[in-house]
Image (tube, rainbow, N blue to C red):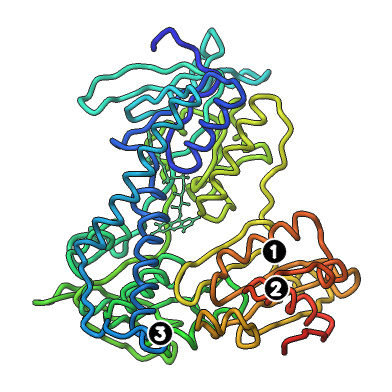
């Protein structure tokens, strides 16, 4: 290994790193993928996207069974939730895809290196010879110092390096997660659904776990500092989600500043100051802290390079290259990116395409689907109505409720709507905001439409199959011109 010079060495095997590695292999680059954990896949595969979506599917089935008699299915009244089996199924899904990744690495001739990687300094210096970072490597290669699980060290040399070290859950008041104060990691491993749960933070993670455990009968309290839940979505989405969550029995608290988290004899007590300025105390069996994720950019040798940080996140240009030539950053550590697996994956594809001298399209912030897989689901892309107006567009809005969609009636899911934000002058679609059944699947059409700069005139004549939930998209496009057929 010591004498091998890789075209690209990637630090971190989450969705950003492994996607970059596979594409690099496909492009014929000599690639090393460095991972400190015992398995490939990162947060997404082990304690993020995949296990949560597995539990959400269990929750959805369980909710359907609650209404089984409405669908003419009798005899399931005595149903019982076997949590151990739920957990086993989740684990088997994760294992299957972990093995899948190992296979893909072999298939694409990626050298997987186990160990903790750290940049050791700049490989080259710019013409002004900035020697404050130490002497440049004579061979112009980047070097990564590698520490193995048993403390053994070695070195990896590469022409290019991609940093994909990901993120980890932020905690509050310096509290360490345990069996009662949980982050996404501990909550995924609970022995039983808790009787009561306070979720602090109403972004995707807080919303999804609130939804899962509410389905399984947990008394859920959601506490959000900002004035609304799903705070980065269009305001109407937050309003509809609040309505449905309350209908589902979730206690939703917004504008709530958490002041204290204390262990009690049987659980945890959270104190917050509510929107009305009054202090509220509530006790629950468990607390989920879901207040955002910090980039893992400490202790990877960044200080020995010219890489620039913005509040801990790495600044990059549109090729994902940092201020240190030949070092790229992708995924959750990138400044200005939403922390999503598909953003990480695409940024990895961009970086290796650049390295291989291939054509690419830079990641565009306004073409990213944002999905929250709670019940009801949210799928959105592009500008919210308020953002479009702030940017100076004269907007036209079309909104179509799932209540008017026949497939939504068939699947028994009538909450929510599709909202289209379009430019009034040319009819270009600026944003699509969906809350309701399969919103996370439906949003794919909207992203494709925006990527192709589709207009309302074109989309109103795009045939959508009947009966489908996707027809709600057609009706919403037509609603922009006040001509939805089914409302
Ligand atoms: C509960 C939860 C649910 C989520 N659900 C979704 C979802 O449904 N859809 C979605 O798009 N996103 C979801 N996300 C976000 C998604 O998981 C992240 O955006 C994604 O994992 C980021 O990928 P990444 O490759 O940048 O980093 P990570 O997945 O965090 O992977 C980084 C990897 O780098 C390794 N590493 C770090 N430092 C070093 C080092 N110095 N040397 C060697 N290895 C190192 C780590 O061990 C890790 O394996 C969810 C997140 C959470 C917490």
On screen, residue 271 versus residue 14, left or right, reads left
**In the rendered image, is residue 286 in sight?**
yes
Q: Point out residue 176 in the picture as x, y percentages from the top left corner.
A: 23, 58
Question: Tag 1, which secondary structure?
Answer: helix
List the residue tagged with mark 2: 473
Q: Point out residue 105 in the picture as x, y percentages from the top left corner.
A: 44, 29
Up the image or down, 409 lies above or below 151; here it is: below
Up the image or down, 384 lies above or below 71; here it is: above
Q: CA distance from mark 2 to mark 1?
A: 9 Å
Choose between 103 and 202: the one closer to the eye.
Answer: 103
Choose between 288 and 396: the one closer to the eye.
Answer: 396
Nearest to viewer (mark 2 / mark 1):
2
Nearest to viewer (mark 3 / mark 1):
1
List the residue tagged with mark 1: 446
Question: Tag 2, which secondary structure?
Answer: helix
List the residue tagged with mark 3: 252
Q: CA distance from mark 2 to mark 3?
A: 29 Å
**Does the CB distance between marks 2 and 1 fall below 8 Å?**
yes
């Amino acid at each position: 290994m010591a004498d091998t010079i890789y075209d690209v060495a990637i630090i971190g095997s989450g969705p950003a790193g492994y996607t970059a590695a596979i594409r690099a292999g496909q492009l014929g680059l000599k690639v090393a993928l460095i991972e400190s954990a015992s398995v490939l896949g990162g947060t997404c595969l082990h304690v993020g996207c995949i296990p949560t979506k597995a539990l959400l599917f269990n929750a959805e089935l369980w909710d359907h069974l609650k209404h089984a008699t409405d669908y003419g299915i009798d005899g399931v009244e005595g149903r019982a939730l076997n949590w151990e089996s739920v957990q086993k199924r989740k684990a088997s899904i994760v294992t299957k895809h972990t093995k899948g990744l190992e296979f893909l690495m072999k298939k694409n001739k990626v050298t997987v290196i186990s160990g903790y990687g750290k940049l050791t300094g700049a490989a080259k210096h710019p013409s002004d010879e900035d020697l404050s970072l130490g002497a440049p490597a004579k061979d112009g290669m980047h070097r990564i110092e590698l520490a193995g699980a048993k403390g053994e060290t070695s070195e990896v040399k590469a022409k290019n390096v991609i940093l994909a070290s990901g993120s980890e859950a932020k905690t509050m008041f310096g509290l360490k997660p345990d069996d009662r104060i949980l982050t996404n990691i501990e909550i995924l491993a609970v022995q039983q659904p808790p009787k009561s749960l306070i979720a602090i933070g109403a972004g995707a993670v807080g919303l999804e776990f609130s939804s899962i455990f509410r389905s399984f009968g947990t008394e859920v309290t959601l506490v959000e500092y900002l004035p609304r839940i799903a705070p980065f979505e269009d305001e109407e989405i937050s309003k509809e989600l609040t309505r449905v969550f309350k209908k589902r029995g979730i206690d939703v608290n917004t504008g709530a500043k958490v002041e204290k988290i204390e262990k009690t004899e049987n659980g945890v007590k959270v104190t917050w100051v509510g929107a009305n300025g009054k202090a509220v105390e509530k006790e629950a069996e468990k607390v989920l802290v879901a207040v955002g994720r910090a980039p893992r950019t400490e202790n990877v040798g960044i200080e020995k390079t010219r890489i620039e940080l913005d509040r801990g996140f790495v600044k990059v240009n549109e090729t994902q290259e940092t201020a240190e030539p030949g070092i790229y950053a992708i995924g959750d550590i990138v400044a200005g990116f939403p922390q999503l697996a598909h953003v990480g994956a695409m940024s990895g594809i961009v970086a290796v395409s650049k390295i291989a001298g291939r054509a690419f399209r830079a990641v565009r912030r306004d073409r990213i689907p944002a999905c929250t897989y709670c019940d009801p689901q949210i799928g959105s892309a592009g500008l919210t109505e308020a953002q479009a107006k702030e940017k100076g567009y004269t907007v036209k809005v079309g909104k179509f409720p799932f209540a008017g969609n026949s497939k939504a009636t068939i699947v028994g899911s009538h909450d929510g709507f599709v909202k289209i934000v379009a430019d009034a002058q040319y009819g270009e679609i600026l944003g699509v905001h969906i809350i309701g059944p399969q919103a996370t699947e439906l949003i794919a059409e909207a992203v494709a439409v925006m990527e192709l700069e589709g207009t309302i005139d074109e989309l109103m004549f795009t045939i959508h199959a009947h009966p489908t939930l996707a027809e709600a998209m057609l009706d919403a496009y037509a609603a922009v011109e006040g001509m939805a057929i089914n409302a």
